[in-house]
């Protein structure tokens, strides 16, 4: 699971939305930020990450990725959006199926986690 | 919500299990670590935090507490257990009810997040 999260970060660094999307199960759900309507299904998720990566967003881990004693892992990161001169402080939690694919991604950040 | 999470950290620093427990709703659930059987109800939760604080555990935030656009907040922290000479790297996610009380705490850490 930690390897998948690292691949997710690496996929962003390479600008490779397909690499990121391949980590997700076909019926996965992405809720980013938590509280907004979720993005459901791999096609919509690929579009979501294509847009995110297309915006120039760059991810930096704020510390080691955390695992669990169950089917989930989590990481704290800072998302830089160079064009908009913004940074967003995020904690992302991923839940996995038995095949090691992400079935749910929840990104915790609120309005005051967006800083200049 | 962020203030509640900060109070949680401060309660640990003061060794005050009642201060930490007061943040939770009567029927709250604590899953720490995620994947272990949850602790349910405020009496069991108070016992859980009394034991945790009694062990000498000290919490340090690894970065700013994150909010959300919904009813949840999250933080990355390091738990030091001085007697056991251990550190545990954790991400905790708290979900709140309409009264601002925590109804669910989920702590993400796995065996390899425990370091010496």
Image: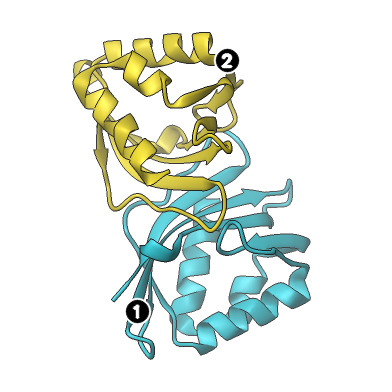
Chain colours: A cyan, B yellow
How far apart marks 2 and 1 lie (CA) works out to 41 Å
Residue drawn at 49 percent across, 36 percent down: B100
Secondary element at image label 1 = strand
- Tell me: B29 left or right of A79: right
The image shows residue A84 at horizontal and vertical percentages of 38, 87
Secondary element at image label 2 = loop
The image shows residue A6 at horizontal and vertical percentages of 47, 62
Name the residue nearer the viewer: B57 or A111: A111
Q: Residues within 10 Å of mark 1 (few under 14, many from 20)?
A: few
Residue drawn at 40 percent across, 53 percent down: B66
Of all chains, the one bearing label 1 is A
The image shows residue B2 at horizontal and vertical percentages of 37, 45
Q: Which residue is mark 2?
A: B41
Q: How many marks?
A: 2
Name the residue nearer the viewer: A96 or A114: A114
User: Is residue B115 visible in the rendered structure shown here?
Assistant: no
Of all chains, the one bearing label 2 is B
Q: Which residue is mark 1?
A: A86
Name the residue nearer the viewer: A76 or B99: B99
User: Is residue B93 visible in the rendered structure shown here?
Assistant: yes
Residue drawn at 67 percent across, 70 percent down: A22
- Tell me: A44 left or right of B107: right
């Amino acid at each position: 699971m930690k390897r998948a999260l690292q691949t997710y970060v690496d996929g962003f660094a390479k600008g490779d939305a397909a690499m990121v999307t391949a980590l997700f199960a076909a019926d996965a759900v992405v809720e980013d930020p938590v509280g907004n309507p979720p993005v459901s299904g791999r096609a919509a998720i690929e579009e979501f990450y294509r847009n995110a990566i297309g915006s120039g967003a760059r991810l930096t881990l704020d510390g080691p990725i955390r695992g669990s004693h169950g089917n989930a892992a989590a990481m704290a990161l800072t998302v830089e959006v160079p064009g908009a001169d913004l940074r967003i402080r995020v904690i992302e939690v991923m839940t996995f199926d038995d095949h090691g694919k992400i079935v749910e991604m929840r990104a915790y950040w609120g309005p005051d986690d967006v800083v200049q």
